[in-house]
Image: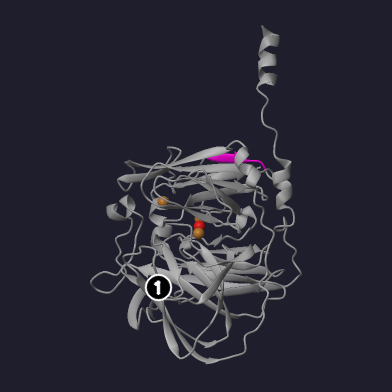
Amino acid sequence: MRWVFVLAIVGCRSTPPAPDLVAELANAYPETATPDGKLIEVEIVAAETTIELIDGKPLRVWAYNGTVPGPTLRVRLGDTLRVKLTNKLPQETTIHWHGVRVPNGMDGVPHMTQPPVAPGGTFTYEFTPKDAGTFWFHPHVRSSEQVERGLYGLLIVEDKAPPPYREVTWILDDWMLGPDGQIFDNFNTMHDLAHDGRWGNAITVNGRTDTRLTAAAGERIRLRLLNASNGRIYAVDLAGLDAKIIAVDGLYARTPSTLGRFELAPGNRLDLDVTIKGGGRSLIVTDRFVPQRPNRLAEIDIDGSVPERTIEPPHMKVPAWASGLAEPVTHEFRLDARQGGTYGIEWTIDGKAFAGHDHHHDPGLVLERGKWARLRFVNASARLHPIHLHGMFFKLLARDSVPVDEPFFRDTVLVHGNENIDIGVVPLDAGSWMMHCHILEHAEAGMMTMIDVR
Ligand code: C2O
Ligand code: CU
């Protein structure tokens, strides 16, 4: 009896791990940081304040250091960043460094990686970024309210020798203003939860609806875009300018690619290499995510001209991981909704809704450090879910089983209604990392889980 059983097990040959897939990642991005001894110290105070926003009208917001967007932190690769957060909000808060590969204890996930910072309290974050690129920071407590009220900022990690672009940063956000012109303070409504989160009625770029960029023909601009909205997705149309994608979610691409329709979901960043052409005209930059309802984002005035410079944009090794689709799926996450919970609707991952106030969560998945894994997201709902993984970069492998080779890594990928997607990942950092929908209302209503990397 016994030997028959053993034979049966040998006979079903479990698939061996895929060392070549791990090897393909070699020299893409470093496993560890290399601090060069320089410490940058910053103080951030989160507080309620009134600012002139959206074309000069006073707006009550929650802000980092009194501005929305908050301060842009700029460090250079090798620098160590130390940020002392002081919480003057009427609620607990934390800071999450979106896309930055930080030690687990610096990741800002309340109860899981740190105790939340109580009103009046402080917490000091310290880490040395491993990657140069465009990152951002925001609270991870009641994010659907705290981010919406204005708490977010950019973290730019410069290369050791930054390419000589003119740098422009555009942070896209939309606001839901009530009839009084103030932030509509009913958060997580049934409507927002049943749809794709809170889509506002005022779209701003860097906190204004009248953002203008004046540039000369021939200029090469590195345009860093961030979508800081709770739910809205943008497809930025640069009005015919030559724009190439050079980095996504921080990391450089394998090769620059033409900006076509790129769906910039909440949390996503996009670095574009824009060449200004033509003269004496104004271009309207438009969001065309919903083609029938374009939104004006900003204006570019082309004035004068400068000699065009040759800039070789940095690039990175990005594996194709083509053989990854032949590997078995390590885990399939099912994304769905059901009635119930605090808000009447719960968004679930594998049938579980994450409750932020619970201090203990079993991981939704355990992955082995340094091993290649193929994860599948099955969207059983008709809504959008930009899925974000903390602590690791991943690569899209397929949409609805059709292989895709994007020339870049991501930390957030948009899963459309009823779509299945496959990603490949090699987690390099041990820890308990959050995975969630970056439509903040969906996350708040349960669409979060933890991936433990051991
Ligand atoms: Cu941008 Cu879990 O976050
Ligand atoms: Cu979602």
Q: From the viewer's perspective, is 427 left or right of 190?
A: right
Image-quadrant location for residue 76: bottom right
Dot 1 amino acid type: Thr
Crowding near the residue tagged with mark 1, few <14, some 14–19, many ≥20 C-alpha atoms within 10 Å: some
> What residue appears at the point 68 percent right and 76 percent down from the top-left corner?
162
Q: Identify residue for label 1.
A: 286
Front residue of 288/76: it is 288
Residue 64 seen from this side: no
Residue 403, position in %: x, y?
55, 47
> What residue appears at the point 62 percent right and 85 percent down from the top-left corner?
308
Residue 394 forms part of the magenta stretch: no
Residue 425, position in %: x, y?
62, 48
Front residue of 256/102: it is 256
Whether residue 79 is situated above or below residue 165 in the rendered picture: above
Front residue of 225/428: it is 225
Q: Residue furthest bottom?
A: 304
Whether residue 269 is situated above or below residue 180 in the rendered picture: above
Residue 367 forms part of the magenta stretch: yes
Which residues make up the magenta segment?
A: 364-368
Front residue of 372/184: it is 372
Q: From the viewer's perspective, is 151 left or right of 9?
A: left
